[in-house]
Image: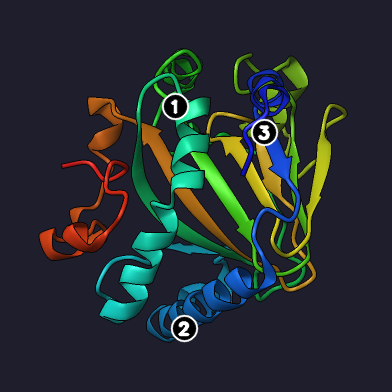
Amino acid sequence: MIIKESLINDFMKDGYVKIPKCFASNEIKELSKIVTRFHGAWIHANREFYQTRAINSAYLTSEQHLCERDRFALFTFVSQIHLVNLVNNLLKDKAVFMGTQVFFDPVNSQQNNYWHRDSQYHLSEAEQFVALSGPEVLHFRIALKDERGIEFIPGSHNTWDTEEELAVRLEKDGHRSHEPLSSGTEVPLAAGDLLVFSANIIHRGLYGMDRLALDILYCEKSPELLGFLQQDCMPNNDQLDRLENRSIFHS
């Protein structure tokens, strides 16, 4: 992967960047097998949640649902030099692997999506504003099949909501978080595409097409972010010794 200055500039300006056909079909095929095994086991363990409202799951690299071989394959994938170089070019500080998620369609086809910043689920509105200038978390979304993608408010990773955006996102004054926003930009994905975006950006997933995507989360090595790391999702010492590039894992 050649990291062009224009790619970095686009990310800094918009808060997201898409790299089409970043991964070869054989890579996506093998990754899909692992994600599908996890997804099946996760559904079995979380059937009610999956049937009623779920749109994503997490912690693929824990020992709960995947075997040692699959977990090590994921550790190898998330620590590959191409991804590490990219995330280190996009963050102000050296990057740390934070975790993984799987995104899928809700069982109920009438379930609404919703505008959000990731920070709104653990910070107050005032704290969310401050977080725009704080340490960064990045999503590296890998589409495992063609999908509708994500809708973004470009530049909102650095700027606070407009009156319209805030009312919809936080459901103020009778608004609902699934209402369309005039400033939204849709970014569709094809299998093998990589979509990198800031956790601070205002965004919503676009459901449909039986989506299946793997998100790798990386963050700056900041104490306030490292507290979110799940140690059981990190490689053990034996696994670290077998990884060619272990710099991405916090120790």
The alpha-carbon separation of the residues under discs 1 and 2 comes to: 31 Å
Q: Is residue 242 left or right of residue 58?
A: left
Which of pointers 1 and 3 lies earlier in the amino acid sequence?
Answer: 3
Instruction: Note whether 115 is above or below 162 in the view shown.
Output: below
Instruction: Note whether 143 is above or below 92 in the view shown.
Output: below
Quadrant of res 67: bottom left
Marks 3,2: beta carbons within 8 A: no
Identify the residue at horizontal 67%, vertical 38% (top origin): 203
Q: What is the quadrant of the N terminus in the image?
A: top right
Could you say where residue 210 lies in the image, as x and y percent from the top left? 73, 73
> Which amino acid is tagged 3?
Tyr
| Category of crowding for the residue at label 2, using alpha-carbon neighbours closer than 10 angstroms: few (below 14), some (14–19), many (at least 20) | some
Residue denoted by label 3: 16
> Which amino acid is tagged 2?
Arg
> Which amino acid is tagged 1?
Glu
Q: Is residue 173 visible?
A: no
Residue denoted by label 2: 37
The alpha-carbon separation of the residues under discs 1 and 3 comes to: 13 Å
Residue denoted by label 1: 136
Q: Nearer the viewer, residue 191 or 107?
A: 191
Which of pointers 3 and 2 lies earlier in the amino acid sequence?
Answer: 3
Which SS class for mark 2?
A: helix
How is this picture coloured? rainbow
